[in-house]
Image (tube, rainbow, N blue to C red):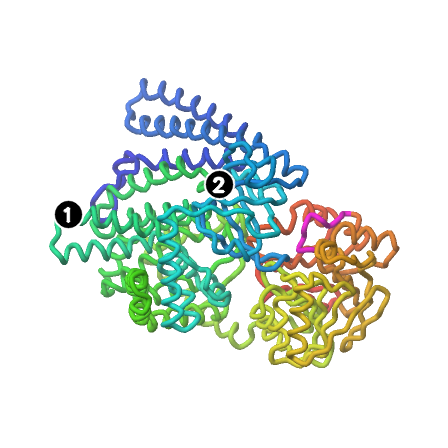
Amino acid sequence: MTMSGAPVPDGRVLDLRLLPSAGMCWGATLVGIELGWRAALWTAVGALAAAATAVVVAVAGTRRALAGVLIAALLIGAGFAVAVAARERAVAEHPLTAVASRGGHVSLTVVPVDDPRRVRSPAGDTVMVRASLRSIDARGPGAGGYAVGGSVVVFAPADGWQELLPGLRVSLRGKVSRPIRRDLTVATIRVTGAPLRVEPAPRTQRAAGAVRDRFAAAARSALPSEAAGLLPGLVVGDTSGLPGAVRDDFTAAGLSHLTAVSGANISILIGAVLLLMRALALGPRTSAVLAAAALAAFVILARPSPSVLRAAVMGSIGLLALMTGRRKQAMPALGAAVIVLLALFPTLAVDFGFALSVAATAALVLLAPGWTRWLRARGWPRALAEAVAVATAAYVATVPIVAAMSGTLSTVAVAANVAVAPVIAPVTVIGAIGAAGAAVWLPLGGLIVRATGPPLWWLLRVAEWAAGAPGATVAVPAGLAGAAVMAGIAAGLLLAIRSRWLRRVLAAAVLGLALVWVPARVLWPGWPLRDWVLVACDVGQGDAVVLAAGDGAAVVIDAGPEPRLVDGCLDRLGVRTVAAVVLTHLHADHIDGLPGVLRGRRVGAVVLGPMHQPERGFRQVSTQAAASGVAIREARAGQQLRLGALTFRVLGPTLPVPRSPAAGAEMANEQSLVLSVDTIAGRILLTGDVEAEGQRDLLRDRVPVAADILKLPHHGSRTTTEEFLRAVGASLVVVSVGQGNTFGHPNPGILRALQEMGATVARTDRGGDVAVGRSGGGAISVGRP
């Protein structure tokens, strides 16, 4: 069987000849980005040698068609390897690379390529901006410099940066550091103030920005807050107004792909345009031109970033497969799209979104039609059969990638996607019409989007119910190991269901599991851990640690970055009385969740360290505590704090308190409260975000930091010293860290050091809340929900 003759259930033939070329291009680009330019060149040499061997075999053999496909794939792969090697070499020799190695400051002119995205940061309200470098301004911003290319990532305060449009020129000055990941980015720039100069954006982007703003305003005027934040995300990928609770529900329910510009958006919108053209009896050429114009307008409105362009291409291919049934042409189109997109945007090779999109599109073409026919042959209605087949095929194809990316698996994703499938197309189409109406007249847009209220209500409720179901997400191995395991399971299930006997066995196993496991999770969910002593709440990139303080009360150490997250954790633990909230320092990822602790609970006091900087944080905490009638206490090194049934020893900070606000803001981490407390599980050391200087000062002052359990400082940042870890000597180390955070926490070197010391590491980004207690045999026990 040749690659151009792969049969499918309907008797037609799929042309797969471009897939090896697409795979070689992807693999060569991935090797170059992840392993460097030398590895890419060796890949090119190996591909050329293999191609030469294949030529010799083809001349002497009979399978020349197959050999031709292989030779073409090897040659184009070699070309991609050379191209990515040149790009990687340029990154390695870029002028900013030397500056990043010493952490210097620089003045730059950049052009944003995508909308600013909000990220959680200790500095407070922060955005991340991906930008293209235009010049390094050696004599200062606006004073001229030398032109230079490359991609940079800018982290900056939301104030002054949140409203920036792609395509405008921005002058800035910031601190340069190494890229946060290998993706052909030359440097990370951290800016502490507003842009120094902003030139106007291109006219098309200004128009698109105006339409997006008016669309969001129309949604806010016509819909409840959750629905108003969700609608722009569904239609044009604008999630700036999406509440955090909704975002988390969609992630847990396996619906997060709906709030990003995806191939589904494109298929629905362009499909609606084509159906309208057909109803108007327009010819195929006119329809194609109008559909292409609608596609171009949507790309501009959603921002022509690599992810949006990828979605446009994949959505067009999916539409081709669904509307024309010409699956034979869909696979060559997919292969060609992968090659072209990787040539234009090599960083897509390391983009999980790209991998998910390709896998889902391939599943739509290869699996969904056959599964739809199989279900219809067994009496399923067409609409239901298509919805189940598409959702299941996409789930099966993408589950290894999701496992590698997040280390979690949604068990409710298929059911949730089937449940919301009927409302996605109406919401998308009506929303797009509403966006056009709002651009003409804001009240008209509001009137139109009001019709999306009922389907949006259903979508939000499905996400909420699915996310709240027992076992909605389960932890699986992350990285390549997780991908391999889940791919093997998926392949095994696909083979198993081809046998009627195995299908019956699987159905019986699933039914039995549901009858036993679901009631058990509902009646006895196994959480919280019996006789828990400490719980590190999963609050994302932040800290919130809860200690049992007797008689149902608790002490909360830090409150995380969002009220809802810490509030939910305390609710799951059944905590209604808080003896005290201890805020180790006043960074946003430790204090912004304070209202979630104060709301609806009896709170004895808020305890702060000796430094009241940053001033914004101190004002915020003081205002919130006063509004709840809770007193503020101050703790200093050498004191003992009796909080509930627990006695805390205040070990630090031992460094002098900075006097100036600027120095205080800079030294906030080093001024973290460091506490130890003896419990039935052993001595616990709580360290806030204290960094190397503060740790060394504790050791110089011979402060007794030895403990059985350590809350790792600063989310596992590289600023923790091995000397400090050895002095603590903990057998269990708890890391409060956000999944997929942009800071590289926890640092791999720190994790290796802990492993060499024989410590067990428990992380909140690997399965959620972490509970610590004392087992019946006297050993420390660790549990998860």
Q: Nearer the viewer, residue 438 or 311?
A: 438
Q: Residue, x 41% and y 49% (percent of image)? A: 356
Left of 251 or right of it: where is 452?
A: left
Distance of label 2 from label 1 (alpha carbons): 39 Å
| x and y, in percent, of residue 77 in the image | 41, 30
Left of 507 or right of it: where is 328?
A: left
Nearer the camera: disc 2 or disc 1: 2
Classify residue 454 by image quadrant.
Answer: bottom left
Q: Looking at the image, is 189 positioned above or below residue 159?
A: above
Q: Residue, x 56% and y 32% (percent of image)? A: 94
Q: Which residue is mark 2?
A: 132
Give the magenta range.
Answer: 713-722
| x and y, in percent, of residue 43 in the image | 48, 28
| x and y, in percent, of residue 67 in the image | 33, 26
Amino acid type of the residue that numbered disc 1 sits on in the rendered structure: Pro
State the residue lying farthest toward the front. Answer: 143
* First reached walking from the N terminus: tag 2 or tag 1: 2
Q: Which residue is mark 1?
A: 284
Amino acid type of the residue that numbered disc 2 sits on in the rendered structure: Ser
Disc 1 element: helix
Numbered-mark total: 2
Magenta span has 405? no
Please tell me how crowded label 1 is: few (under 14), some (14-19), or many (20+) other residues with Cα within 10 Å: few
Please tell me how crowded label 2 is: few (under 14), some (14-19), or many (20+) other residues with Cα within 10 Å: many
